[in-house]
C-alpha cells in the first residue's frame, strides 16, 4: 500500500481519483492547490505525489521546483495537453513520469507502481496490494483469497465483495453502496442480490449469519468485515 498525495484543483476529478485510488488500496491525501500541496508533502511525507500541472496558484514547473526544494518524493504530473515541450520541461524540472488527461485510475495506478518500483525507495512491500483481515488474506493481483493459508474457491463477484469489504475492514458498508461499487448498479438494485452473495461467502468462510465470524450484518445499516480475534460489538 502506497501513501499518495494528490494535488488537483478540479474537485470532480479529485474526488473521483481519490475514490478510485483508495479502491486500488492506496492511502491518499489530497490538496486543491500548490501551496496546500507543498505543505501536505512536508507534513504527510507521501511515497509519491500526483501533481496536476494546471493549478490556480502556481505554474506546474514552478511548483515542481519548489517541491524539489523540500523533498525528493517521486512525482507523476498530470497534464491536460499532450504537449511535448511542456512534458520535456516538467520532466526536466524533476518529474518522474507523466499522464495525459483524461486518464483512468488504473492507468495512473500502473504508472505509480512503475515509478515506485523504479525509485525502489518505497520497497516492494509498500506497493503490495494484499489485504489481510486476521487469518484471511486477499491478493487482488491473482484474485486469490486464503483462509488460514488455504485457498478459497470464490466466484468473481464473491471475490469482489470480499475484497471490497476487506479493504474497508471494521467499516460498516451499506448494501446500496455495495450495489453501486461491486455490482456497478449506480441506481441501486435488490438488497437480495447482496444478501445471497453474503450467504454464499459465509458458507465458504465457514460461518453462518447466526454465528458470524468475519461478516457482521448491522441491521438496517449494512455489513462489515472484522478480524474474529478482535471480536465485534454487534
Ligand atoms: Ca487543473
Image (tube, rainbow, N blue to C red):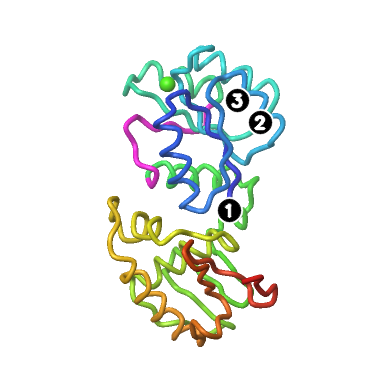
Which residue is labeled 2 in the image?
A: 72
Q: Position of residue 210 (x, y in %)?
A: 52, 85
Q: Position of residue 162 (x, y in %)?
A: 46, 69
Residue interval drawn in magenta: 95-106
Disc 1 packing (10 Å; few <14; some 14–19; many ≥20) = some
Q: Secondary structure at mark 1?
A: loop
Residue 180, disc: none
User: Which quarter of the rendered picture does the C terminus lie within?
Assistant: bottom right
Give the residue displayed 62% in from the left and 41% down from the top.
47
Circle 1 or circle 3, nearest the eye? 3
- Residue at mark 2: C-beta within 8 A of ligand 1: no
Q: Earlier in the sequence, mark 3 or mark 2?
A: 3
Query: Could you give the CA–CA distance between mark 3 and mark 2, rounded to whole angstroms?
Result: 14 Å
Question: Front-most of 23 and 227?
Answer: 227
Q: Secondary structure at mark 2?
A: loop
Tell whether label 2 touches label 1 (CB within 8 Å). no
Q: Position of residue 1 (x, y in %)?
A: 58, 53
Task: Tell me which image quadrant ligand 1 sits in.
Answer: top left
Q: Secondary structure at mark 3?
A: helix
For the image shown, how many numbered marks are present on the structure?
3
Circle 3 or circle 2, nearest the eye? 3
Question: Front-most of 31 and 128?
Answer: 31
Disc 3 packing (10 Å; few <14; some 14–19; many ≥20) = many
Q: Earlier in the sequence, mark 1 or mark 2?
A: 1
Residue 1, disc: 1
Query: Could you give the CA–CA distance between mark 1 and mark 2, rounded to whole angstroms?
Result: 19 Å
- Above or below — where is 76 with respect to 119? above
Report which quarter residue 66 is drawn in.
Answer: top right
Give the residue displayed 49% in from the left and 82% down from the top.
209
Which residue is labeled 3 in the image?
A: 37
Amino acid at each position: 500500500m502506497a501513501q499518495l498525495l494528490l494535488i488537483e484543483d478540479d474537485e470532480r476529478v479529485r474526488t473521483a481519483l481519490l475514490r478510485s485510488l483508495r479502491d486500488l488500496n492506496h492511502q491518499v491525501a489530497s490538496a486543491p492547490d500548490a501551496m496546500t500541496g507543498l505543505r501536505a508533502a512536508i507534513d504527510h511525507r507521501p511515497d509519491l505525489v500526483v501533481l496536476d500541472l494546471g493549478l490556480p496558484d502556481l505554474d506546474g514547473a514552478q511548483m515542481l521546483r519548489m517541491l524539489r526544494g523540500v523533498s525528493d518524493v517521486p512525482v507523476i504530473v498530470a497534464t491536460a495537453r499532450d504537449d511535448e515541450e511542456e512534458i520535456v520541461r516538467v520532466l526536466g524540472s524533476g518529474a518522474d513520469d507523466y499522464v495525459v488527461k483524461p486518464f483512468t485510475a488504473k492507468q495512473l495506478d500502473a504508472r505509480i507502481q512503475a515509478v515506485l518500483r523504479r525509485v525502489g525507495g518505497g520497497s516492494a512491500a509498500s506497493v503490495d496490494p494484499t489485504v489481510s483481515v486476521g487469518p484471511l488474506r486477499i491478493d487482488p493481483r491473482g484474485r486469490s483469497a486464503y483462509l488460514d493459508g488455504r485457498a478459497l474457491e470464490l466466484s468473481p463477484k464473491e471475490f469482489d465483495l470480499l475484497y471490497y469489504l476487506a479493504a474497508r475492514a471494521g467499516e460498516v458498508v451499506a448494501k446500496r453502496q455495495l450495489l453501486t461499487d461491486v455490482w456497478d448498479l449506480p441506481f441501486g438494485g435488490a438488497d437480495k442480490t447482496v444478501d445471497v452473495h453474503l450467504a454464499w461467502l459465509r458458507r465458504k468462510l465457514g460461518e453462518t449469519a447466526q454465528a458470524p465470524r468475519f461478516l457482521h450484518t448491522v441491521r438496517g445499516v449494512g455489513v462489515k468485515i472484522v478480524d474474529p480475534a478482535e471480536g465485534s460489538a454487534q
